[in-house]
Image (spheres, coloured by chain):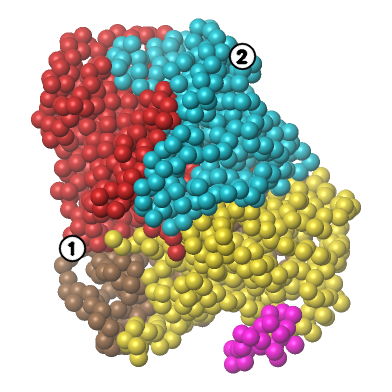
Chain colours: A yellow, B brown, C red, D cyan
């Protein structure tokens, strides 16, 4: 199995390594009839593309997606949609510094323990570059959801300890700063913080928040394939994510029932509404018709130029300085990855939901 | 599909409703040769059994498990292990108060939206009673893991805002208080808090922490079936869980790379060790040989006796008071459920790992 | 995994051994709202029940099914439907004759090779008794299909070399003879043949044919989950089946394109029809709107009272006479099993088909 | 789901259409450490390549495979192996003759019924060209099996009514004739028959037989994922296959238990052996250590140049003559496809078998 497949109905399989020939994904189960062009996918890939600023790695990835199958005369045919992105920047490099040494905070040691050896070039399969496949597939899922009036938007909630202020929330502002924060003031402060980290050869973490609007009530499968459970898996599977929460999340653990319960009421249009959204749009693992709210905590980029202690493949104590182009914080580029993972999850469960009733 | 199946190799399917004939689970894929008796499972079920104190619901569930298949002469045969628990306490009741009204914080409305109607007796399939199937299967997974020297232990980390102090951590203490806290001082404070909530007809949430010891490095499948991703799904699928984190979790988002990276070193026995465990035992989705640490945030019990606003099936505004026996906090009884979900996940990925190399 | 799960949307997991506590199955993914009672399932189980005549084993199985979950107020709820049948006839027996000896034509040796040991009582999990779980689940699938006007009927096509004559085909006749043949003349001849085999302490094979009427065009998933591929797997998974064919099957291999192609024409009602049905209702793995026709070849019952050569667990050459109650031919009781497997397959793919288009 | 995924541990997903950009497959779950080069795969693709003789279509497909990921320094890494073949021969053509007309014996009508429209160029996804992905993946599976001493060989058993004579069986002879028959005499006769069909603008079917040697006893999962059941699905999923049998297959249905049972005996080397192999190497769905024997019946190529009756998309009666390059019989090129499907199935179950015991 090996774990590169996600979904039951809308099912994707990704492939590719950081410095191999490319990155790709095949989607099996996208319904027929969806209008789809390479440009629809490219705009999502562009958002995760590196080299957009000093705050992200300078690597030139290009990331031009090609649709290899599954689309005919501009529409999906219902058969597998293969997407591929060629790796352009595979320049030959001196890997001796990392091929035999385990970088702290990376999966090098774990891959060796699991497989006996690893593709050490740029992290191989465990590189963040792998997320290009997720984003390409996620773009198709977003397009499918958009067809049903469902919109997925993620943004940077916090960088280190600097949080976007809900009182200043403006999604459009996300496009105006290099950190994808929906709050210009917090963004400026965070940018200064990241510049400082660069000077100190350090890195930081942050939180991505994602909001799904327009999802009808009734999506999600009890017991194990709950909407929140599937979202948690999808988002936690993104490298560097160490925590996921829905609605009030960990704060709910400190709350009381009388505060946390969302009262239902009859909306002006006669539909069932909630006065608050502590639930984050999910009750009992099934969407309740309100916005889905989830947050993902990203750890600091483990690749830092400072000297660190570690061991080599022979098990000897050694020191390492991780050279090269690395994001001081992965969060800005991870925003679109979280969107992609949320969209893939919702698309799959939305289709699954078609089978709930006679 | 409907979502009641978990796992690929060690695969379980659960069934049952709160007030139906019983609760059960079938395990397909447990290796042959494991010594297994009903008593091995019963001791886990006893830990989630209600009625153990004023702090948990007074319902008498009995929860006597029966092994229906898959064990011969005291050993698993490799074929499906069916486990069932009969519901004893199905006394006929007046459900009119909830059959047509959507309880806030519950899945009543979502089930109706999804299926068109629901088994309203005690929450039906969305009841916490469903976790008996998880625990029964989890007990078998724990036994399998124990065979390989792997031990899964969960405990109450916090009740509302009252946290167990890591400085006073004593796992054995867990058995000495009604809240399963590994800290006698915090437990006493928390018990007083819960008593107060009962008086106020309110409820609270809390956090369960789980530690997995003895898991070798190399378990977990890149990309989507990472160990942390699968744990997140399994634990988030437990009713009332709103957040999951691994290692430093959300705190890692506020940290720096230089702090968060765990330095590797050569252990006295020549093995690879880490000086710290910010990673919670998982790097790149694969176990790193250290203890796995995860936490689950539980929301407050939504069933409270106070009057709440809601709507009925006809979409009219109404008021509701949820009567009956309800835990003021689900955390103590959920401790063994988190253990079960963690064990099921690890057992599956451990077996999967047998196929990683030639 | 271990292989006791079938289906993706309409998913079943079976359990149970010949001489264990019982046999059961859980169905996850049956749509909500289907009217279902134990009697609906019982009538299918009654058709596979032994002891109906001298031509089938005299074992009294009872086979009273109990619905344990998933049905509320007479309708399926969309959550798992657990079905169980208690084994009544578990009388203690002397198994020494087979516990250490490998019966020819049985899976005894294979189970030992796979698992290291086996439940030797009556074949354990490899017993034909396991099919009770299939039939119980299949009965639910048949009921679901009937809701959509789809009907699955199997019957005995041949016993040994004696074939039902298509010119005398009368499905109703199936109920009038002990061999479930839709041809009274062939049935009489076949019964005489089976009586002869009983006298000779021998057994024979036969062919079951199954016809699915009312299935709309468009069901089945290219490439691997074709309707015929899934049917082949489902039917070949029944013990003793050694061959499966669709439409003209093996005869098509001896045919010409000009004979085998079914010409399309416009039906009186304006729909697309075929002049012939060599395809057996499936083209390119997708239903073509015509009747689905499949046949399964069953090998002779391996349990015969004659002396046979074999080896024991120690690998020594020994002789064996298989005592006890055994059907001289499994075909009559297998008819309803083939129906069940066909219905489970079609139900799953029919639901899957709901996701083919936007 | 859409059906383009096969396998649980050794899992493949294929993509591509006849006249799209290419055909490909990704393998997730191949164990790490297997030596693999493009040439290992190319030799399998060459065997299915068209244009090798007058008896196969003249289309120039090239079929140069490229390994895009999952191999590092000549060895599989355990991560997904992406394989792609570019379609070279996509010359623009006049499709008006088939774009609105349903070719008899093809899936055109079924695809329209399922998806609402179809990629009509050369059959799109339902083209035999799709099998290139199967063969590429199968080549990797064969290499994995070879590592364990398991060898999969298919050959043409019959063309129309002309059968290879078991008495003249010589596998090496397969390479000496254009029909892949292991019998020079039958091959000559069959070639003459096919030449005659070409003159008559007709086509024929045939049977492929496959033998798997070296598979140890114990592979296959009861109940639904039996080795024979999985083989049946895999092979029946190949376009044009209408029947599958194992061992004596349909002949077993006409046999007696006393003839069909294979007697066990102690081999000279002390292992368990069978005196005959009516079982085709599988008992109770699990390999018995003997050679696996399976046969697949292929229908005649539906594309024939003769005039045929059919309907168009508007549902009107029309006539059609299918022009272009078509194999008069698909069997010779399908031989390697059957090998591929058998190898994929056995590889998956072999790996699964690693989890059968503690």
Q: Position of residue B287 (x, y in %)?
A: 64, 53
Can residue C334 be spotted in the picture? yes
Can residue C135 be spotted in the picture? no
Residue lying furthest bottom in this view?
A167
Element class at badge 2: helix
Residue lying furthest right in this view?
A94
The magenta segment is A164-189
Circle nearer the viewer, 2 or 1: 2
Disc 1: which residue: C73
Q: Position of residue A251 (x, y in %)?
A: 52, 80
Which of A243/D244 is in front?
Answer: D244
Quick one: label 1, few (<14), some, or many (20+) residues within 10 Å?
few
Q: Position of residue A119 (x, y in %)?
A: 76, 48
- On screen, residue C25 versus residue B226, left or right, reads left
Element class at badge 1: loop
| Quarter of the image that includes the N terminus of chain B | bottom left
| Quarter of the image that includes the C terminus of chain B | top right
Q: CA distance from mark 2 to mark 1?
A: 67 Å
Which of C272/B327 is in front?
Answer: C272
Residue appearing at x 62%, y 45% in the figure: D23
Residue appearing at x 27%, y 31% in the figure: C209
Is residue A288 located in the magenta-colored stretch of the structure?
A: no
Q: Chain of mark 1?
A: C
Residue appearing at x 19%, y 40% in the figure: C45
Residue D173 numbered mark, or none:
2
């Amino acid at each position: 199995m090996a774990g590169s497949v996600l979904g039951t109905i809308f099912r994707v399989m990704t492939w590719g390594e950081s410095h191999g020939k490319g990155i790709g994904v095949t989607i099996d189960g996208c319904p027929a009839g969806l209008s789809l062009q390479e440009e629809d996918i490219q705009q999502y890939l562009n958002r995760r593309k590196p080299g957009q600023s000093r705050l992200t790695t300078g690597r030139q990835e290009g990331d031009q997606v090609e649709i290899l199958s599954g689309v005919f005369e501009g529409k999906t045919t219902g058969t597998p949609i293969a997407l591929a992105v060629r790796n352009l920047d595979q320049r030959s490099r001196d890997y001796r510094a990392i091929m035999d040494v385990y970088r702290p905070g990376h999966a090098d040691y774990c891959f060796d323990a699991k497989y006996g050896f690893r593709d050490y070039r740029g992290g191989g399969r465990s590189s963040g570059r792998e997320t290009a496949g997720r984003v390409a597939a996620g773009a198709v899922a977003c397009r499918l959801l958009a067809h049903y009036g469902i919109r997925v938007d993620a943004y940077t909630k916090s960088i280190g300890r600097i949080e976007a202020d809900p009182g200043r929330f403006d999604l459009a502002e996300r496009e105006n700063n290099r950190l994808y924060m929906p709050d210009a003031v917090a963004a400026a402060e965070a940018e200064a913080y990241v510049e400082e980290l660069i000077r100190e050869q350090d890195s930081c973490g942050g939180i991505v928040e994602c909001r799904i609007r327009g999802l009808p009530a009734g999506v999600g499968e009890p017991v194990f394939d709950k909407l929140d459970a599937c979202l948690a898996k999808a988002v936690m599977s993104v490298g560097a994510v160490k925590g996921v929460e829905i609605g009030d999340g960990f704060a709910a653990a400190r709350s009381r029932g009388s505060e946390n319960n969302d009262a239902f009421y009859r909306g002006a249009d006669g539909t069932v509404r909630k006065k608050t959204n502590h639930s984050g749009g999910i009750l009992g693992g099934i969407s309740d018709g309100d916005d889905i709210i989830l947050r993902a905590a990203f750890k600091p980029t483990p690749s830092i130029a400072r000297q660190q202690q570690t061991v080599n493949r022979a098990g000897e104590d050694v020191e390492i300085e991780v050279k090269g182009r690395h994001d001081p914080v992965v969060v800005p580029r991870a925003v679109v990855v979280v969107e992609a993972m949320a969209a893939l999850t919702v698309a799959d469960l939305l289709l699954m939901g078609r089978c709930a009733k006679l």
